[in-house]
Image (cartoon, coloured by chain):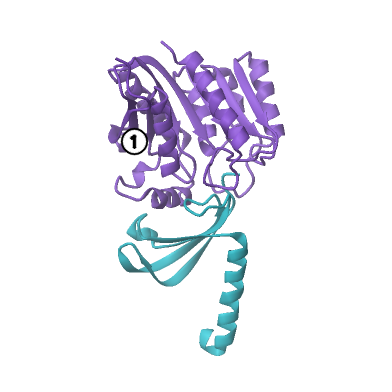
């Protein structure tokens, strides 16, 4: 399979890429062939600011298990923060 | 004097697209005076990556002028290939018309090389397999190799991020012999998708040669992925060089 559904979401925050820190406005989430990771498919997230061009991107390619653990970790961290994270 | 074994020269060249855009391409030429056949290498969806450039060098090492244009060059010539791939994906992929124009320019470039014998083949992997078929029904080439290209046949799933349509209806336009290499465990294309293509080729009376590998799925040529299947890949490479040897000799 070459490509699966892309799930985009608007985000607010910053990421550090090849040119240093920049604001990120979108995250593209998809399960597909990676560019670098040594797996057949990975859960890929592109943190980006499309308005700044293709290079304004921080990419991660995670194994499916890693991605699930990351989701749990994020959820747990936000829950522990309680009201401060709302 | 015979050329040194597998000696070659690789460089980045800038092509001019039919729309005037600058397109960077990886061009590799064997040592020696030729004449050599040419091979247009189409990269897969993840982009103009090192793995595809390595494949391009492999053809030159076997005595072919080879070129791999960056299909995502319109994102900028200085943009990292992975960033260009992500941006192109977000934009819905490369339109078929733009691809055909870029493939035409690349084929013309190969034929214009002073060492060219005038023959040019095309090969693509994954999404590039579909592009190889699209080239073969659109551009005057002498041989085409489709390595597990999805959506030549079949139905594109609803919500699919790329604006692609099946090409099987254009089988009658095929201009050259087609070699197809497929894994029987692949989901895109499934063996049934391959059956559909084979039936269309038979109906149209087009020359083709298919090889289907048990125990192999999608991307079995990818040496740095778990999908790599040495037996299928080694046999597949032999089929490719036999096929090009038959159809791209002067």
Front residue of this view, candidates B123 and B175: B123
Pick out the residue farthest to the top. B250
* Residue A62 in picture, x, y percent from top left: 54, 61
Residue B199 position (above or below residue B23): above
Q: Colour of chain A?
A: cyan
Residue A12 position (above or below residue B4): below
Q: Is residue B137 visible?
A: no
Using a 10 Å C-alpha cutoff, classify the residue at mark 1 as few (fewer than 14 neighbours), some (14 to 19) or many (20 or more).
Answer: many
Residue at x 39% of width, y 60% of height: A57
Q: Colour of chain B?
A: purple
* Residue B113 in picture, x, y percent from top left: 29, 20
Residue annotated with mark 1 = B25
Query: In terms of image quadrants, where is residue B147?
Result: top right
Q: Is residue B117 visible?
A: yes
Query: In terms of image quadrants, where is residue A69?
Result: bottom right
Image-based side of B15 in relation to B235, left or right: left
Pick out the residue farthest to the bottom. A83
* Residue A53 in picture, x, y percent from top left: 34, 56
**Dot 1: what SS?**
strand
């Amino acid at each position: 399979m070459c490509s699966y559904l892309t799930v985009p979401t608007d985000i607010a925050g910053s990421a550090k890429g090849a040119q240093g820190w920049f604001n990120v406005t979108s995250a593209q989430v998809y399960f597909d062939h990676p560019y670098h990771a040594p797996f057949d498919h990975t859960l890929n997230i592109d943190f980006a600011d499309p308005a700044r061009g293709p290079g304004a991107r921080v990419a991660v390619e995670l194994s499916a298990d890693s991605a699930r653990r990351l989701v749990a970790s994020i959820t747990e961290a936000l829950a522990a923060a309680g009201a401060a994270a709302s | 004097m015979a050329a040194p074994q597998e000696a070659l020269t690789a460089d980045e060249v800038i092509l001019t697209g039919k729309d005037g855009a600058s397109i960077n391409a990886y061009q590799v030429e064997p040592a020696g005076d030729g004449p050599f056949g040419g091979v247009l290498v189409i990269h897969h969806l993840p982009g103009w990556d090192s793995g595809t450039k390595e494949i391009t060098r492999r053809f030159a090492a076997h005595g072919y002028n080879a070129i791999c244009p960056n299909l995502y060059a319109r994102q900028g010539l200085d943009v990292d290939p992975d960033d260009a791939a992500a941006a192109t994906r977000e934009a819905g992929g490369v339109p078929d018309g733009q691809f055909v124009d870029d493939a035409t320019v690349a084929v013309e470039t190969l034929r214009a090389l002073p060492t060219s014998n005038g023959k040019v083949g095309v090969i693509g992997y994954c999404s590039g397999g579909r592009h190889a078929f699209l080239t073969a029904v659109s551009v005057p080439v002498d041989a085409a190799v489709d390595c597990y290209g999805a959506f030549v046949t079949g139905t594109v799933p609803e919500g699919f991020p790329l604006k692609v349509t099946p090409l099987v209806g254009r089988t009658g336009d095929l201009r050259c012999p087609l070699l197809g290499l497929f894994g029987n465990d692949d989901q895109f294309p499934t063996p049934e998708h391959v059956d559909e293509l084979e039936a269309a080729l038979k109906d149209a009376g087009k020359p083709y040669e298919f090889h289907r590998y048990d125990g192999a799925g999608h991307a079995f040529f990818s040496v740095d992925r778990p999908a790599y299947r040495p037996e299928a890949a080694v046999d597949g490479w032999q089929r490719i060089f036999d096929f090009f040897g038959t159809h791209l000799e002067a």
